[in-house]
Amino acid sequence: MSGRISTREAAGAARVGLALILRAAPGRAGASLAATIVSAGLPIATAWATKLVIDRLADPHDAITAPALALAGIGLAATVLPGLGRYLHAQIGRATGVLATDRLFGAAERQVGLRRFEDPAFLDRLRLAKQSTTDFGGLVDGAGSTLRGTLTLVGFIGSLLILSPTMTALVLVAGVPVLIAELRLSRMRAGMLWDNEQAHRREFFYGGLLTGVQAATEIRLFGIGPVLRARMLGERRRADQAERRMDLREFVTQAALGALGAAVAGGGLWWAVTAAHDGGLTVGDVVMFVAALTGIQNALNTLVASIAATYGQLLGLTHYVAVTRAEPDLVSATAGPAVVPAPGAGIEFHDVWFRYSDEHPWVLNGVDLSIAHGRAVALVGLNGAGKSTLVKLLCRMYDPTRGRITWDGVDLREIPPAALRERISAVFQDHMNYDMSAAENIALGDPAHLDDRDRIEAAAQRAGIHEKLAALPRGYDTLLTRMFFSEADKENPDTGVVLSGGQWQRLALARAFIRVGRDLMILDEPGSGLDPQAEHEVHTRMREYREGRTSLLISHRLGAVRDADVIVVLAAGRVAEHGSHEELLDREGHYAKLFRLQAAGYQEAK
């Protein structure tokens, strides 16, 4: 990514922006265009009407009513049109922003895997693209100002041409370096702002740590605050230094350009006054000349400023275009079944290798694994053995780098991800706690049943959290967050309740249990955050729930997996051994060593 965009990129972004505007607000866009054209002509009309009034004042026999009324009408229009333009631009910006946001997040949803969302470059683009959708009003303003400035400039050039072709040529020649220099400054400032983006992001990161709740305890206990504050201010100073250099460059350049403009204006005014004195120009002509000269310079300034603003908007839109046109990270085969076949042979990993990129080491190294239909399989191993990665491949968050995974003989790559995931329910160790109501937190496990209170409560009963939720101030409708209320409101429990870690874990279980009738249940450390009694209860409930279903259980607590039909031990990305609890203990291998190590720890605790 870069802070500078090519002409082709700018043109492409402009086409996308125009298409969005015309789709979201065609009528208001047309009205805005008409208002812009009329506004562009008002300064020129004002200058000509003023000339006519002054010339006719010099001759008492000339009628002055018509030009005077015209001048009054122009003044009225000049009063009304700016407000109308701002109103139209705001309405266009809002309507277009809604449409653009919908398309942006629709494009993000098309990335059905995780690879894009673990790519910092893509996340940067996504964040900048999101920012661009909130300021389409600014894009409309910039485009309108550019058009208005262009039309006004052309109109005043034409007016000046009537009075003096020579002075017109001189003004235009003097205006060329002004335009070139201002555009160059605009590009340099856009580049500087882009270069400062990283510094500002780090500044916001450190500021967020200093003012947030998540890190507050450690920051105060370990005395980290001064370190973070120093780094935050260091990033601010680096960004400020770059901006000061840019400010100085702009000041020097614009001072020189201002002196050039003043010299041209002074010379032109001397010529006009001299010509009027000699009878070559009327007083009205002099007024018209001054108005045209001033109008050209003002139009140039407006044009340059609007081009700079539009440039910044188009830079954001290039990120929007890149995200909305990005190919999906997972592509299904063109042929193959649309859904998973009826349960039968089960799930097979065939020599599966995986790494997150060519620069990363292999996480899985030729895994061969069978998960038979209706059987409970436990997956154990040390941290980094590849357990979570294997689950991500099974849910098709990624595709294997080598090898293949089949479900009842069908390669997962031939199954649409949505159809595959419809057959899976899961509880993850790093489960989400949604800042929503208790009922919604459960129902999000199967959004089709958001309003099915009986099903929601049945899932909560199965997870052992029903009584807690029913006893909340507003029952299942109680918000499980305090983030949406003022500090005063937080003293009122009716405004929101924060659950404990173990209660959130049970809620995550209920979210999985609401997905009834699924063919595969994945349980990734479902007992984490629970006390021993609660963990035993949860595992008992899960054994009842997964009876007769295919299940994959991941746990570091080997006592929780001993009743699985098959226990698979992963080590260094490979299947080191597999079998029942008793078989693995008899082999005296990895599993036996880990199990006895944990058992010894509990015995010592006694």
Image (cartoon, grey):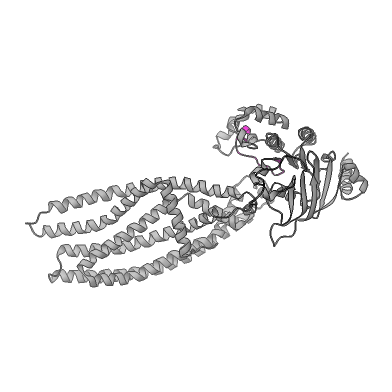
Residue 586 shown left or right of residue 274 in the figure: right
Q: Nearer the viewer, residue 474 or 258?
A: 474
Quarter location, residue 231: bottom right
Residue at left offset 92%, top offset 48%: 587
Furthest residue in direction left, as rendered: 61
Q: Quick check: is 439 in the magenta stretch? A: yes
Res. 559 in view: yes
Residue at left offset 27%, top offset 68%: 265
Q: Quick check: is 133 in the magenta stretch? A: no
Q: Nearer the viewer, residue 302 or 604?
A: 302
The x and y percentages for residue 172 are: 30, 70
Q: Quadrant of the C terminus?
A: top right
Residue at left offset 44%, top offset 67%: 248
Q: Quadrant of the N terminus?
A: bottom right
Magenta residue span:
426-440
Q: How many marks?
A: 0
Q: Nearer the viewer, residue 329 or 598?
A: 329
Residue 105 shown left or right of residue 249 in the figure: right
Res. 243 in view: no
The x and y percentages for residue 102 are: 51, 46
Residue 457 shown left or right of residue 538 in the figure: left
The x and y percentages for residue 535 are: 78, 36
Residue 579 shown left or right of residue 186 in the figure: right
Q: Nearer the viewer, residue 193 or 403?
A: 403
Tell me which secondary structure the magenta stretch mostly adopts.
Answer: loop
The x and y percentages for residue 179 are: 37, 67
Residue at left offset 19%, top offset 69%: 272
